[in-house]
């Protein structure tokens, strides 16, 4: 685990990062999901799994090569964190 992904839960087999984001309202959740979609299109990276409710979003990022989490996944996780901070 490094500083970029310190707030994410890391799993080794299969290699993935997981984080739950909580929001105060549905509007904030929706804004975050819209920003996440735009970020995914911009970077070409997409979460393996997104699960959400009215005021939360669960995101799972997997290793692009299927073997190890690299700098690209960690940088993407950091950018997702930044989106959550700006969606409030």
Image: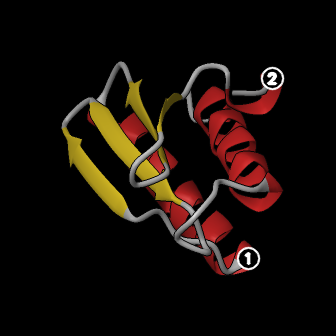
State whether residue 41 is above or below residue 80: below
SS class, disc 1: helix
Residue 44 image offset from top left, x and y in percent: 67, 80
Residue 22 image offset from top left, x and y in percent: 37, 23
Residue 61, label in figure: none
State whether residue 30 is above or below residue 45: above
- 3D distance between C-alphas at marks 2 and 1: 23 Å
Q: Image point 60% across, 72% down: which residue?
A: 64
Residue 42 image offset from top left, x and y in percent: 73, 76
Q: Image point 66% across, 65% down: which residue?
A: 39
Residue that mark 1 sits on: 42
SS class, disc 2: helix
Q: In what quadrant of the picture does the C terminus appear? A: top right
Side of 87 where 86 appears, left or right: right
Q: Image point 65% across, 53% down: which residue?
A: 69
Residue that mark 2 sits on: 3
């Amino acid at each position: 685990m490094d500083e970029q992904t310190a707030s994410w839960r890391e799993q080794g087999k299969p290699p993935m990062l997981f984080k739950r984001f909580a929001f105060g309202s549905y509007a904030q959740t929706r804004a975050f999901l819209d920003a996440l979609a735009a970020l995914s299109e911009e970077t070409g990276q997409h979460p393996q799994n997104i699960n959400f409710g009215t005021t939360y979003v669960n995101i799972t990022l997997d290793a692009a090569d299927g073997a190890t989490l690299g700098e690209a996944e960690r940088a993407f996780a950091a950018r997702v964190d930044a989106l959550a901070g700006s969606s409030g």
